[in-house]
Amino acid sequence: MKAESAIKMHILSSDKNYFFLYSGGFDSSYGLLKLLIDGEMTSPLNIVFFDYGQAAATYEWEAVQKVYAFLKKSFDSSRTLQKPIRFDLRSDLFSWTDSVSFTGSNHTPKNANFSETEIENRNMVLFSVLYSYILSLINRQNIDRCEIVIFTGLRDKELPDASSSFFFHLSEAMEEYHKEYQISVEYIIDKTPAEILYELKNNVLGLNGAQVLEFCKSVSSCYRPQNGEPCYNCPKCKDVDSIIKFVFNKGRF
């Protein structure tokens, strides 16, 4: 696994450790926002972004950094939120598919029809990689006992690797294999983008109008961005159409 610019590895605590598998998308961004506002984090929250050659990787990574900057400025007075780390998973990891590119910083898909950020069973692969990374940290740092919670923003009953049963069995398997480490996965969001926007509109989390607009402008909302802007035609753009319209209307509903 190749990390960007020889980054430092995470330092684990013998108590609780939180990781957030983050894509920069609207649902996971909202999940990250809720975690901070709820204020239940008792240890640093580590944000991990995986670049596996998806077409929108650069766009998504920029969104990750924008959302982080917004949350850090607005809600992270306790310094819970850790700076996002981008792991480059290209090279041979996904060499079994023609869907993505693997060379240099080129994110142009090999398959012209590959427009979405997802590959088959993407979450299964990414959770496996993150799980392996965490185990390597445990071994390198000689941690005898600790608790690891991996957060993810998405829960979608239509996707086999994003369903409630997937996360339940994933947690069960990790806990059974490493009982002393109490490793588990928790999803945060079970809402559509329109439902999330409705909550923001109605001030459920206590954001003011300017904060809601800045937040929505920061997230990624497209599988095929053009010059850093949404394409408006891909499945993701259609899914978050209400958010795009909200941003274009400068916060007016």
Image: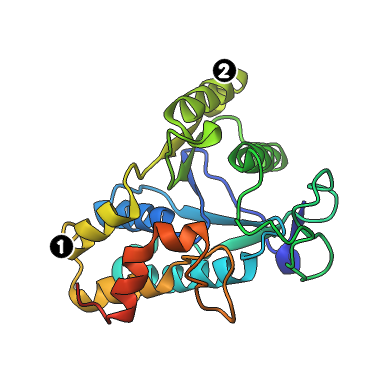
Residue found at the far left of this picture: 202
**Mark 2 or 1, closer to the camera:** 1
Residue 24 visible, this orientation: yes
Closest to the observer, 83 or 61: 61
Q: Disc 2, disc 1: CB below 8 Å?
A: no
* Disc nearer the start of the sequence (2/1): 2
Find numbered disc 2 in the image and state the secondary structure of the residue it sits on.
helix
Q: Residue at x 33, y 58 (%)?
A: 33
Residue 146 visible, this orientation: no
Q: Which colour style is shown?
A: rainbow
Q: Which residue type carries mark 2? A: Glu
Q: Residues within 10 Å of mark 2 (few under 14, many from 20)?
A: few
Q: Tell me the quarter of the picture where residue 179 sits.
A: top right
Find numbered disc 1 in the image and state the secondary structure of the residue it sits on.
loop
Q: Which residue type carries mark 1? A: Asn
Q: Position of residue 109 (x, y in %)?
A: 74, 62
Relative vertical location of residue 220 with respect to residue 118 in this rendering, above or below: below
> If the image is split into quadrants, where does the C terminus sit?
bottom left
Disc 2 marks which residue? 176
Q: Residue at x 61, y 65 (%)?
A: 56
Disc 1 marks which residue? 203
Q: Is residue 201 left or right of residue 115?
A: left
Q: Residue at x 20, y 56 (%)?
A: 199
